Amino acid sequence: MSTVLVLNSGSSSLKYQLVDPESGDAVAGGMVDRIGQSSGTVKHETGGEKVVRDLDVPDHGEALRVVKGMFDEVGPKLADADVIAVGHRVVHGGEIFSAPTLVDDDVVAGIRDLIPLAPLHNPANVTGIEVARELLHVPHVAVFDTAFFASLPAAASTYALDRKIAAEHGVRRYGFHGTSHQFVSTAVAAHPAVVAKLAAEGRGPETLRQVVLHLGNGASASAVLGGRPVDTSMGLTPLEGLVMGTRSGDVDPGVVFHLMRGGLSGADVDTLLNKKSGVLGLSGVSDMRELRGLVAAGDADARLARDVYLHRLRKYVGAYAAVLGGIDVLTFTAGVGENDYTIRSGVVRDLGFLGLAIDPAANEAPSGEARVISASPLVEPVETSPVGTPLVMVVPTNEELAIARFAADLVAAD
């Protein structure tokens, strides 16, 4: 068995997973949390055994040494795991990186140069790569969140700004969560129900029209035609688009100037829109499970937060139906999308005019498998319609597996 160690370096955390890219199995994994704070925590899990310890983790170098120590002590030993590569999640690839890339000094410098486009994420990504290259002497591969959306049509990726200024500052729609959107949309296209649907309609996979909703604390939507993205909700940064746990999503840019004229600094507005808005700003909580409890208890602020969240989602589904010329499959993924049936039913409610409908029993049944949850459409398509009954699906995402397979394939081809 050959494995890939997948690392996701955040500003104060290091998530890791040892993956067999061929079988798709996660051999071990965990997280070092509160890096650089007074007291850190490591959680390591393998073979059903979970070990949690409190310890000092002053920096990412120590965090990775802690991870290596947990593998040595709890297992499996990295020396015995035939680690063929380390795969790194990198948030922003800009216009430089549009595919998984073998890491060398020039690549590290390129990722560092992109820090102005992702000041909250790329610095930690660079640090994690530098430390890992010092401690783990195997090929390292950077996999970029923006890569899947690098080929967006110009009409979708271009903001209506002065083109010289936009070019000078690298302003365009980059999109994020691309590894997840690519993994999920590929899995959807290969699902037996989707294959059968296209065959029954006499259509090829190049015609498949998908809307994918990646709903976690961060949230994004994509429109995918024949495996290629044609639009996505996040933009220059991960702030644009859907309402998220702490991010506002779409707002009038004039709000920024209005708040700054009112006395807030640029840093204040940045913190407000990224960390104190979204579901948290409207309800006081960012976790959708907590929000659901508050709604059930009759909390008016929580109910409004849920309604705003769902309204934005329905609006994007409708917009992407227009971009695609119809929807063949609407897919939910990520933590909220996979686990909160009330959000799924709330999104699809009132979208019967698109032929979308959910089977309540299938929607509410707990499952960790990719599955169809749609019912007969509320509005039957007319006989001459080129679009059959659309499917609604839940497909678990697995970004770690996707990164591991990208890394393994790139190393094998090198």
Image (cartoon, rainbow, N blue to C red):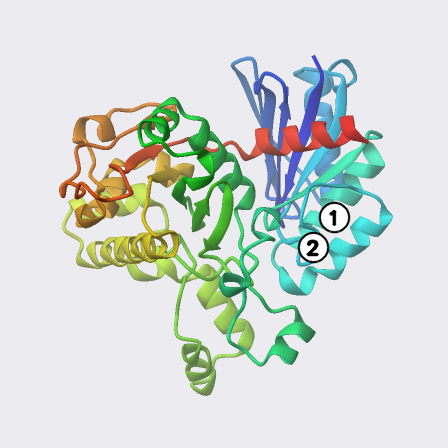
Reading the image, the residue beneath label 2 is 123
- Give coordinates of residue 45: x percent, y percent: 56, 21
* Amino acid, disc 2: Pro
Q: Nearer the viewer, residue 354 or 293?
A: 354
Using the image, determine if residue 382 lies above or below residue 235.
above
- Give coordinates of residue 55: x percent, y percent: 64, 34
Residue found at x 41% / y 25%: 191
Q: Is residue 35 visible?
A: yes
Estimate how packed mark 2 is, as few (under 14), some (14 to 19) or many (20 or more) residues with alpha carbons within 10 Å. many
- How many marks on residues? 2
Reading the image, the residue beneath label 1 is 127
Estimate how packed mark 1 is, as few (under 14), some (14 to 19) or many (20 or more) residues with alpha carbons within 10 Å. some
Using the image, determine if residue 82 lies above or below residue 230.
above
Residue found at x 75% / y 57%: 112
- Give coordinates of residue 160: x percent, y percent: 51, 75
Q: Nearer the viewer, residue 21 or 182?
A: 182
